[in-house]
Amino acid sequence: MARSSVHEHLRAQVLTPDGLDRSLRRISHEILERNAPRLERLALVGVLTRGVPLARRISENVRQFEGIDVPVGSLDITLHRDDLADEDPDLRGSDVPFDVTGRIVVLVDDVLYTGRTARAAMDALLELGRPAAIRLAILVDRGHRELPIRADHVGKNVPTARGDRVLVNLKETDGEDGVIVVGD
């Protein structure tokens, strides 16, 4: 059998659409349990791009589970990233239609890797006000932290190699749900 001359990558599906949905339901329940009885002070802020639909889904889950409407905002962290010094940033703009001061804000993102995105998100959020607490909800934690940051709520821990890529697909942005790890 001849080997292909095209460089092939190993692909492993780590979350199916059902698995992704279960992970988000579990995260939603954890957020409710951790923040009761102060749910009226709860807010969700998704990190652009894929954190926003995840935050909206968590908010919808909370509404279905408890009948509580949790406000959702979106956060553009571009100007707070430490890896764009020589680039012309593509600003998408934050939309946080509520005052974060005094609220319990759950930052939502798709993948936690080095921790630099989470740090940038906290910096951007603190420019908007002073939350009572900031929590971090992540769909996939892949390890390899460079900063002392950990998520409060994790959908799935996925051990990866540094060279791997974690591809999160969401219906809202990609037409389908699922998480795939692509390695060399």
Image (cartoon, rainbow, N blue to C red):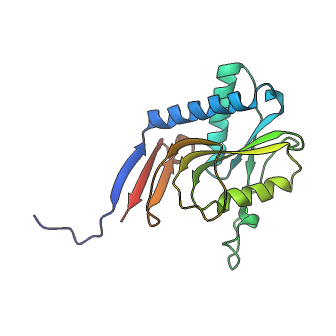
Residue 92 in view in this figure: no
How many numbered tags mark residues here?
Answer: 0
In percent of width and height, residue 14 lies at 42, 45
- Placement of the N terminus among the 4 image quadrants: bottom left
In percent of width and height, residue 81 lies at 71, 66
Residue at (81, 46) in percent of width and height: 96
Query: Most extreme residue toward the front, as rendered?
Result: 148
Question: Which one is in front, 86 or 122?
Answer: 122
**Quadrant in the rendering for residue 44:** top right
Residue at (30, 69) in percent of width and height: 7
Residue 38 in view in this figure: yes
- Placement of the C terminus among the 4 image quadrants: bottom left
Residue at (62, 34) in percent of width and height: 57
Question: Which one is in front, 27 or 81?
Answer: 27
Q: Height in image: 137 above or below 126?
A: above
In percent of width and height, residue 4 lies at 21, 68
Q: Is residue 161 left or right of residue 64?
A: left
Q: Is residue 156 left or right of residue 8?
A: right
In percent of width and height, residue 107 lies at 71, 46
Residue at (78, 42) in percent of width and height: 105
